[in-house]
Image (cartoon, helix red, strand yellow):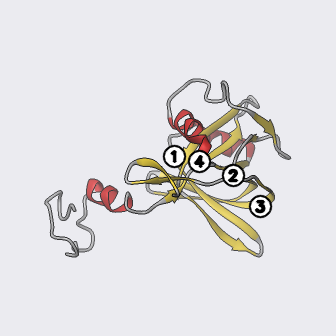
Amino acid sequence: MIGVAGTPCERGRRTPIGTIDPEGLRDILRRFAAGVTVITSLNQQERPAGMTATAFTSVSLEPPQVLVCVNAGARTRQAIESHAGFVVNILSAEQEHVARRFASSASDKFEGIAWHPGMTGAPVLDGALATVECRVAQAIEAGSHVIYVGSVLDGRLGSGRPLLYFEGAYRLLS
């Protein structure tokens, strides 16, 4: 475990508030198993854009809202801003290749990936465990990211097991 300014610390020892370094925090956060999603939208030219993300959660059931966190410098952020909406594609265990593609810097991340336009036109990935289509209700700048709260417009259920991310690797439920 990493503690103050990158120095090792004993298991269970607390780090003083405000002194943890980014790598220490990254090591801590890698211990949180998260579902893997691909966030998709349309850019200003109405071309699909997307990125892999684990920062997704529900906000409210009434009204139905979810949130995603997107790096402020990401091209997908620009697409979400111009389209004012996004789709959260929750990936199934069989879609690790999709997660890797959308986490890459490939120029055409959709090449060879089956999808269809959702109700807003934003891409819905075929084979996803579930999808949630949203309109942006609120955008909050926070550090190096933008938190998008989305009002849920539609959702669909697929089938299968979830793809997870834990300690820097894709994992499956056993």
Q: Alpha-carbon distance for marks 2 and 4?
A: 9 Å
> Which of the two discs, 1 and 4, labels the residue nearer the N terminus?
1
> Which of the two discs, 3 and 2, labels the residue nearer the N terminus?
2
Q: Which mark is residue 49?
A: none
> Which of the two discs, 2 and 4, labels the residue nearer the N terminus?
4
Q: Which mark is residue 72?
A: 1
* Quadrant in which the N terminus is drawn: bottom left
Q: Quadrant of residue 116?
A: top right
Q: Quadrant of residue 58?
A: bottom right
Q: Alpha-carbon distance for marks 1 and 4?
A: 28 Å
Q: Residue drawn at (38%, 57%), measured in percent from left and top?
A: 30
> Which of the two discs, 1 and 3, labels the residue nearer the N terminus?
1
Q: Is disc 1 placed on a helix, strand or loop? A: loop
Mark 1: which amino acid?
Answer: Ala
Q: Alpha-carbon distance for marks 1 and 2?
A: 27 Å
Nearest to the eye among marks 1 and 2: give it.
Answer: 2
Q: Position of residue 133 (x, y in %)?
A: 76, 53
- Disc 3 packing (10 Å; few <14; some 14–19; many ≥20): many
Q: Which mark is residue 152?
A: 3
